Image (cartoon, rainbow, N blue to C red):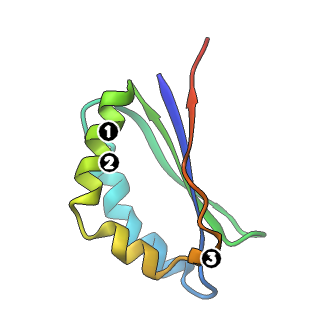
Amino acid sequence: MLKVVAKRHLLPGVKEAYFSLVKPLVEQTRQEPGCIDYALCYNEAENTAAMIETWQDEAALDAHLQKLRASEFPAKMNALTDMTCAPSPEKYYCIY
């Protein structure tokens, strides 16, 4: 099992627009093969949105990322994100 934390620092004033944009992505992703959990979380103090994901394996994550990159979501999410502090997604492999 694999966990991913993908954070985005949002631009000021775009929180609701970002949530509206990402909600369909969350709903679609939850239906993908190998997706165990996919949640949009928000840290008000840092104005940071995070996708906290659980995947069956690396292959399921790779299929998701390939599908995501072929969609309009990345460009639209980037337009609402402070790209000067865009960290890379963090991967955690579950041991127990």
User: Which of the pair 88/52 is nearer the observer?
Assistant: 88
Q: CA distance from mark 2 to mark 3?
A: 22 Å
Q: Residue at x 21, y 60 (%)?
A: 70
Label whose residue precedes the other's in the sequence (2 or 3): 2
The residue type indicated by label 2 comes to: Leu
From the top left corner, tell me how far across and down residue 92 is, in percent: 58, 31
Report crowding for label 1: few under 14, some 14 to 19, many 20 or more residues within 10 A (C-alpha): few
Where's the C terminus, which quadrant? top right
Q: Point out the frontmost of discs 2 and 3.
A: 3
From the top left corner, tell me how far across and down residue 86 is, in percent: 59, 66
Does residue 78 appear to the left or right of 33 in the view shown?
A: right
Task: Tell me the residue that label 1 is attached to.
Answer: 62
Query: Number of marks in the image?
Result: 3
16 up-or-down from 23: above or below: below
- Callout 1 secondary element: helix
Marks 2 and 1: in contact by CB < 8 Å?
A: yes
Q: Residue at x 61, y 59 (%)?
A: 87
Does residue 22 appear to the left or right of 90 in the view shown?
A: left
Q: Which mark is residue 84?
A: 3
Q: Which mark is residue 65?
A: 2
Q: CA distance from mark 1 to mark 2?
A: 5 Å
